[in-house]
């Protein structure tokens, strides 16, 4: 279980490498793209706007050119008991917790897509070799709110404001506000892509860091709810 050190105002302080090399000043270069406009950044986080619509809600099962399967959207609204059926969530308790928190009846937001995976950055990578990352695409249940990118930006900062620092794991967050092709037939809506990322010297350590990041985001999302509307997170 990770140890919360302190909370900050929507900025995530840098965390230490497991090897004891000191404080990481990791910057998320993957977001620096012609399709993205940087909105805010700091140690351990970035917030950007995407200009190209890549997804829609709902979407259907499809096979990607690589042969991978997009399993399609499952409506989890008010049905957290369906989360174990999500193939992507079976890889990570942290990702499953994020989905469960948003699937609660009291939640004002919903998930539309998710994924997670492990990546070998190579023996000579700058920093830890292994990276576990993923994403959850988040929208408001109220479609009108998804037409206002400022509300999604506020929600991104609200999540970051509830992330505790940790000296046990190397974690960072990417937040991307992106246009949707369709949201239940509407063409004027946007979504928030939340990307928790964990690094480690080994696969196990990277996954542990990713789960820490995803769990802390899940707790940040539900922290303003009444106690009886908050759920216990699966930590093991």
Image (cartoon, rainbow, N blue to C red):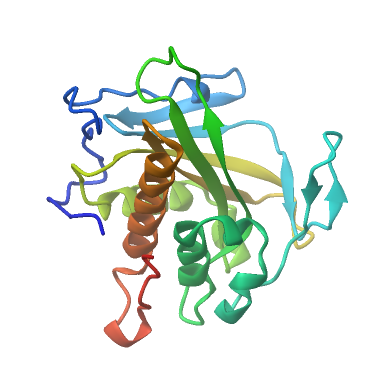
What is the residue that sits farthest to the top in this orientation? 124
Q: Quadrant of residue 2?
A: bottom left
Residue 76, visible in the rendered structure: no
67 horizontally vs 209: left or right: right
Picture residue at 29% right of the left edge, 68% below the top: 223
Front-lying residue, 72 or 233? 233
Q: How many marks?
A: 0
Q: From the viewer's perspective, tell me whether residue 50 is left or right of residue 222.
A: right
Q: Is 203 placed above or below 72 here?
A: above
User: Residue at position x 26%, y 22% from top?
Assistant: 25
Residue 176: x, y in percent? Answer: 51, 39
Q: Quadrant of the C terminus?
A: bottom left
- Which quarter shows the N terminus? bottom left
Q: Residue at x 18, y 42 (%)?
A: 167
Residue name at image x 77 percent, y 57 percent: 71
Q: Position of residue 146 (x, y in %)?
A: 58, 56
Give residue 206's quadrant in the image: top left
Nearest to the observer: residue 44 or residue 107: 44
Kindly indicate the quadrant of the structure image that contains residue 103.
bottom right
């Amino acid at each position: 279980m990770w140890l919360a050190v302190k909370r900050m105002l929507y900025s995530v302080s840098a965390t230490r490498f497991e090897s004891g090399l000191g404080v990481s000043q990791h910057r998320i270069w993957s977001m620096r793209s012609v399709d993205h406009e940087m909105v805010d950044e700091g140690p351990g986080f970035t917030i950007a706007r995407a200009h190209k619509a890549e997804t829609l809600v709902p979407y259907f099962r499809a096979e990607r050119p690589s042969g991978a399967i997009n399993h399609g959207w499952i409506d989890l609204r008010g049905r957290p008991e369906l989360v174990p059926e999500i193939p992507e969530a079976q890889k990570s308790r942290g990702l499953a917790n994020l989905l469960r928190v948003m699937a609660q009846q009291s939640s004002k937001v919903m998930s539309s897509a998710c994924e997670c995976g492990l990546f070998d950055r190579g023996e000579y990578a700058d920093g830890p070799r292994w990276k576990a990352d993923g994403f959850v695409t988040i929208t408001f249940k109220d479609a009108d709110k998804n037409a206002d990118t400022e509300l999604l930006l506020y929600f991104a900062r609200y999540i970051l404001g509830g992330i505790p620092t940790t000296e046990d794991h190397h974690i960072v967050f990417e937040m991307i506000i992106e246009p949707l092709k369709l949201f239940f037939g509407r063409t004027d809506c946007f979504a928030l892509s939340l990307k928790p990322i964990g690094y480690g010297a080994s696969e196990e350590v990277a996954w542990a860091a990713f789960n820490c990041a995803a769990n802390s985001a899940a707790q940040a999302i539900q922290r303003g709810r009444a106690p009886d509307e908050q759920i216990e997170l699966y930590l093991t």
